[in-house]
Amino acid sequence: MNCKHCDNKLANDAKFCNKCGKPVEATAVPKADIEKLKKGILNTGNSVYAIGWITILINVGIYIWSILDKNFSESGLPASDLPGIFIMIVAGSIFIILGSRIKKLVDKNIKTYLQVLLGLSLLLFIWIVSTGGRVGLLFFLVIAYLISSLVSINKLMKAEEFTSTLTSPKYKLDKKGWIIFAVSAFVLFFVAVGFDSVVRSTFGGGNSISAIKEDLVKQIVASAKSQTTLPSELDSVTTLTDIIAEPSALRYEYVLHDVDTSKLSNSAFRNLIISDLCKNESLKSILNEGIDIEYSYAVKDSYQTYFTSFTKTDCSAY
């Protein structure tokens, strides 16, 4: 808040202005508004708690799916690995812990918890989107929600009727507990790296075969990029932005601009691509190596995306 006399910025609990020295008049918050704000923060706590569990369950589910389903790449989801899933589990656990504290409406550190969750959400959003995960865009909604909650808690903290009820509850996970939590997570992350290779070797048909295929994909991508300057404008509406090596797939990523999306769909792109793809001997030879070829399209200035994937069986009729 600011001093009404000299507009100097003041702490929320300031009694006198540290610039002009005049007393600060407390701003009364109507009781109805207090109850409304409290209900909003309660909902935030419940939502954060739920987001934590949903994040864990979805990521664990995707990982198990990617291990057991050989056709997982056709789902359009990015390749899943245990270290990445472990990071999301740790993040989800923090959401669950802090969400359970926020929804009790008795902890004087509620604002700090929201700030921590906002910072964590920003990091997750940047990390997931930078690694090609479109699901990470959902964290943009979480960020917007947490910002609105911070605005509400700032208003609520001005009401003495609310702040006078806040305490510093003792939790099982205190400062020492958080340190142990962080160290354990760090150690278990490296355990997850090793465990992931064992799991994929057991369920994925052999680590050596997967490694050979992965190396081959990387070689193909390196060769393709050496012959192409990216981004490459293919026509007036299509730009090739990247060529990515997935563990057992080659992915072309495009950006579309100034297009009418009313007639676009995954199947439309599939029908448009398949004939030329299967008649291209070099691409067909890649498919015959057991390497899928994926096409991802993102519409500029939009969240709309399209995806299609091809295997060697798709070209058997050509």
Image (cartoon, helix red, strand yellow):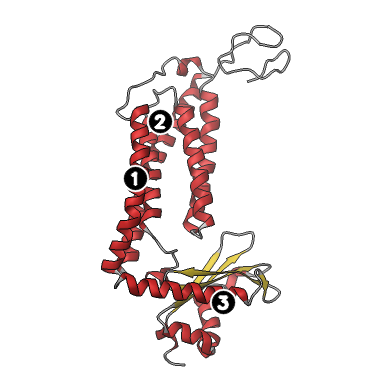
Amino acid found under the numbered disc labelled 3? Ser
Secondary structure of the residue carrying numbered label 1? helix
Q: In this view, does 114 lie to the left or right of 171?
A: right
Circle 3 Cα neighbour tier, 10 Å, few/some/many (<14 / 14–19 / ≥20): few
> Which quadrant would the N terminus be assigned to in this image?
top right
Residue at (57, 59) in percent of width and height:
303
Residue at (60, 73) in percent of width and height:
225
Q: Tell me where residue 313 appears, x and y as whole percent.
A: 40, 85
Vertical placement of residue 211 versus 27, above or below: below
- C-alpha separation, residue under disc 1 versus residue under disc 2: 29 Å
Marks 1 and 2 close (CB-CB < 8 Å): no
Amino acid found under the numbered disc labelled 2? Ile
Vertical placement of residue 305 versus 152, above or below: below
Q: Tell me where residue 296 appears, x and y as whole percent.
A: 53, 70
> In front: 208, or 304?
208
Q: In this view, does 299 lie to the left or right of 70?
A: right
Residue of label 3: 223
- C-alpha separation, residue under disc 3 versus residue under disc 2: 52 Å
First in sequence, mark 3 or 2: give its number: 2
Circle 1 Cα neighbour tier, 10 Å, few/some/many (<14 / 14–19 / ≥20): few
First in sequence, mark 1 or 2: give its number: 2
Residue at (53, 48) in percent of width and height:
140
Residue 10 circle label = none
Q: Tell me where residue 178 appears, x and y as whole percent.
A: 36, 33
Residue of label 1: 187
Tell me if residue 100 can be seen: no
Residue of label 2: 102
> Total label count?
3
Secondary structure of the residue carrying numbered label 3? helix
> In front: 93, or 263?
93
